[in-house]
Image: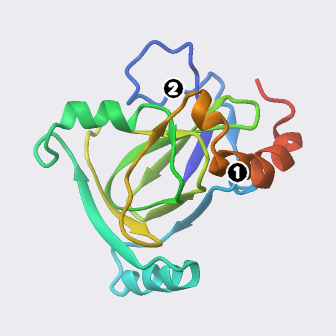
């Protein structure tokens, strides 16, 4: 099941480490939902799990999907791709990932612009709304296989954080729809 916590920027270890505070400063699934992050846990070991994915896809109008395996052996330009994934960015579409095998971290920005780390493993489906600043990295297992779902044709174009993305219409819509209304839930941010 998806777990989330505030990311400890002061931790000098590799980005694939958990980067938790001591004690951990967890973020609830309700808080994630308030900033637009949706999640499901679907048991990939049970026959018929794809029927659940199909139902969610139909309800949310996802028309296309593909799969990606992120490992040194499977992904061309692995090191370069990991750097790209870990660069803070937004998309003009939702980012939908269903983890089939392995595990990794999605980091999102809170309403107070703090990093929140979301740990995902096999069976977790996560949806990040268009316009939300985020990044991705593997954990120390260095392996993830995921299904990517799309409303239309697959789009992977990240818009790296800049003064231009701060005024992007999708970013403005995200702030008005989620971040600003949820700010009170995060008022005590560290």
In-image side of 142 versus 23 (left or right): left
Q: Nearer the viewer, residue 143 or 150?
A: 150
Q: Nearer the viewer, residue 66 or 103?
A: 66
In-image side of 14 versus 112 (left or right): left
Q: Nearer the viewer, residue 55 or 100?
A: 55
Provide residue 111's location: percent of width, then percent of height. 75, 37
Task: Quadrant for the C terminus, please.
Answer: top right
Location of residue 124 with respect to 85 vertically, above or below: below
In-image side of 28 versus 142 (left or right): right
> In what element is the residue under mark 1?
helix
Provide residue 146's location: percent of width, then percent of height. 33, 60
Q: For residue 181, say whether it is visible.
A: yes
User: In front of the other: label 2 or label 1?
Assistant: 1
Provide residue 157's location: percent of width, then percent of height. 39, 48
Quick one: label 2 or label 1, which is nearer the N terminus?
2
Q: Residue at x 52, y 59 (%)?
A: 93
Location of residue 103 with respect to 45 vertically, above or below: above
For label 1, the residue is 174
Q: Nearer the viewer, residue 94 or 109?
A: 94
Q: For residue 35, say whether it is visible.
A: no
Distance between mark 2 and mark 1 Cα atoms: 26 Å
Q: Residue at x 69, y 42 (%)?
A: 27
For label 2, the residue is 19
Tell me where residue 188 sits by quadrant: top right
Q: Residue at x 64, y 51 (%)?
A: 170
In-image side of 150 versus 175 (left or right): left
Query: What's the coloring here?
Result: rainbow
């Amino acid at each position: 099941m998806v777990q989330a916590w505030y990311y400890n920027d002061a931790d000098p270890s590799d980005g694939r480490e958990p980067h938790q505070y001591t004690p951990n400063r967890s973020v609830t699934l309700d808080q994630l939902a308030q900033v637009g992050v949706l999640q499901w846990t679907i048991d990939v070991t049970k026959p018929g799990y794809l029927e659940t994915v199909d139902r969610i896809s139909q309800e949310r109008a996802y028309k296309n999907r593909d799969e990606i395996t992120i490992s040194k052996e499977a992904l061309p330009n692995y090191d370069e791709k990991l750097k790209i994934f870990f660069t803070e960015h937004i998309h003009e579409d939702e980012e939908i990932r269903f983890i089939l095998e392995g595990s990794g971290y999605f980091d999102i920005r809170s309403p107070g612009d703090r990093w929140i780390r979301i740990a995902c493993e096999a069976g977790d489906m996560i949806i990040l709304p268009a316009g939300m600043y985020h990044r991705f990295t593997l954990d120390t297992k260095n392996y993830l296989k995921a299904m990517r779902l799309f409303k239309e044709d697959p789009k992977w174009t990240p818009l790296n954080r800049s003064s231009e993305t701060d005024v992007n219409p999708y970013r403005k819509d995200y702030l008005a729809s989620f971040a600003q209304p949820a700010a009170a839930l995060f008022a005590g941010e560290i």
